[in-house]
Image (cartoon, rainbow, N blue to C red):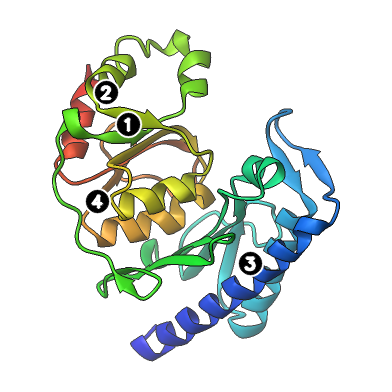
Amino acid sequence: MDMTSWTKVDSLTKEWLREAGATIIASFSTTLNIQTKANANDLVTNLDKETEQFFTEKIKKNFPEHRILGEEGFGDEVKDLQGIVWIIDPIDGTMNFVHQQRNFFISIGIYENGVGKLGYLYDVVHGELYYAQAGEGAYWDKKKLPPLTDGKIEEAVIGLSATWLASNRHLDVEKTLIPLVNDVRSTRSYGSAALEFAYVATGRLDSYINMRLAPWDFAGGKIIVEELGGVVTNLKGEPVNLLETGPVIIARPGLHEKIMNYIKK
């Protein structure tokens, strides 16, 4: 698509994010219909489904040739990334949404032939939008974000789930990630991949490591972080697969290589 067409997509997406966010905020005073998916801690609510349906209807009406890969399955059966594909997580951090009514995001990544074009991470409660257009910079609302700079292991604050570490001792985390945890300044876990991508983009985190992210968890944040010079890879240091669930490591440039040295051990 040409620049004019992308400008239209960008304008409408921002409008839809605000509209969807207002609907979610209004739901705080209502009773949610909460269900589980893969396990008792994998939650989905009626708002997850309704929000994805909202975006699906808007996209199909305005851009019928585009395809949609959504967490809740209301889009298309996407097996390749030819053409323009929207990758959507209607509520990233559903457990936070259910228990806290904060610390959850709407995440959208728009790709053309597998190349990231537009990325959005919307903090619904705070009304803050993090977004990027490839080659045009990344923004936090109207503030242009500076490029990410190198970082030191001993000064790094990384996003890493203690629950994951404790429940996966069979993966030899003592030999890989525990030494990293001991060497960095501190770790944090917020329960939303989109939030942690936004925090890396703004320098509130230096890195984020998750051993099981689906495409809708990282598609939007990947575009933003990479636009700022950050690095997003799998455990082997290779580009992440936008059609598969797997490990994702994101970090400031330079710091990513230092973290990978721990993983390779």
Q: Which residue is mark 3?
A: 21
Q: Considering only vertical position in the picture, is 2 above or below 14?
A: below
Report the residue at 21% width, 63% height from top: 146
Real-space Cα distance between discs 1 and 3? 34 Å
Q: Position of residue 174 (x, y in %)?
A: 34, 9
Give how far apart the Cα atoms at labels 3 and 4 are. 28 Å
Q: Is residue 30 visible?
A: yes
Q: Tell me if mark 1 has few (under 14), some (14-19) or many (20+) residues whose alpha carbon lies within 10 angstroms of its own.
A: some
Estimate the x, y position of residue 85 in percent, counting from the top left. 51, 66
In primary-sequence order, the first of circles 1 and 2 is: 1
Residue type at numbered disc 4: Gly
Which residue position holds label 2? 263
Tag 3 or tag 1, which sits nearer the N-term? Answer: 3
Q: Secondary structure at mark 2?
A: helix
- The residues tagged by marks 3 and 2 sit, at their Cα atoms, a distance apart of 38 Å
Q: Using the rendered view, name the quadrant where residue 63 is placed.
A: bottom right
> Upstream in the sequence, badge 2 or badge 4?
4
The amino acid pointed to by label 1 is: Leu
**Mark 3 or 2, nearer chain start:** 3
Q: Quadrant of residue 173?
A: top left
Q: Residues within 10 Å of mark 3 (few under 14, many from 20)?
A: many
- Left or right of 135, for residue 199: right
Q: Position of residue 104 (x, y in %)?
A: 57, 51
Badge 1 vs badge 2, beta-carbon distance below 8 Å: yes
Q: Tell me whether the residue at label 3 lies in contact with that at label 2, contact meaning CB atoms closer than 8 angstroms.
A: no
Q: Amino acid at mark 2?
A: Ile
- Say which residue label 4 marks: 230
Is residue 112 something that shows in the picture? no
Looking at the picture, does residue 33 appear above or below residue 86?
above
